[in-house]
Image (tube, grey):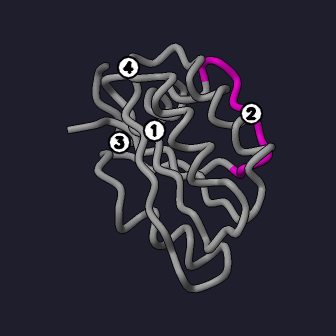
Amino acid sequence: MKKLSIVVATYNRAPYLLRTLESLARQTLSPGLFEILVVNNNSSDNTPEVVAGFAGSHPQLQVRMVTETSQGISYARNCGIASSVGQYIVFIDDDEEAKRRWCRRAVKESPCRQRL
C-alpha cells in the first residue's frame, strides 16, 4: 500500500502543471511510498500529453491521470479522493511547487502516522 497520494487537480494549465510535477519528482520521500494522481478537469489544452511525457521521463514514479467531467475544483478533488490508493491524501495546486521534504513531512507529521 502506498503511504501517500498526491492529488493535483488541473484545468487548462499544462505549462504550470509540468513545474508542479517536476517539484514532486524531487521529493526526498522514497518514490515507492507515494503516487502522483493528476485529475484532468476537462482540459482542452495538452494536459494529457504533458502528464504522459512526465510519466515517461520519470519511470521510478507512479503517475496516473484520471478525468473528472463535472467542472470545478470540488468535483476534481473528490474524484482524486475516490481514485487515490494512499493511506494519506494531500492536495497541491497545479501552479505550485513543493519543497523537497513536503511529502516526507506530510506523512511524518500526520497525527495518524506510522514509522517510515
Kindly state the secondary structure of the residue where label 1 is placed.
Answer: loop
Which amino acid, mark 2?
Arg
- 100 relative to 45 in the view: left or right: left
* Dot 4 crowding, Cα within 10 Å, few <14, some 14–19, many 20+: few
Q: Position of residue 36 (x, y in %)?
A: 47, 41
Residue with the mark numbered 4: 60
Can you identify the residue that label 2 sits on?
Answer: 19
Question: What separation in Å lies between label 1 and label 4 (alpha carbons)?
Answer: 25 Å
Identify the main secondary structure in magenta.
loop
Amino acid at the residue labelled 4: Gln
Q: Which of pointers 1 and 4 indicates the residue nearer the eye?
A: 4
**Three-letter code, disc 3:** Cys
> Residue at position x 51%, y 23% from top?
57
Q: Report the magenta residues as a range.
A: 93-101
Give the residue furthest to the left: 1
- Label 2 residue SS: helix
Q: CA distance from mark 3 to mark 4?
A: 27 Å
Give coordinates of residue 108: x percent, y percent: 45, 27
N-terminal of the pair, mark 3 or mark 4, is 4
Mark closest to the chain's N terminus, 2 or 1: 2
- Which element type, helix, strand or loop, lies under badge 3? loop
- Kindly indicate whether the residue at mark 3 contacts the one at mark 1 (C-beta within 8 angstroms): yes
Q: In this rendering, would 103 be left or right of 85?
A: right
Taking the magenta stretch, the answer to whether it contains residue 100 is yes
The mark nearer the N terminus, 1 or 4, is 4
Q: Which mark is residue 110?
A: 1
Mark number displayed over residue 112? 3
Residue 13 percent location from the top left of the image: 77, 55
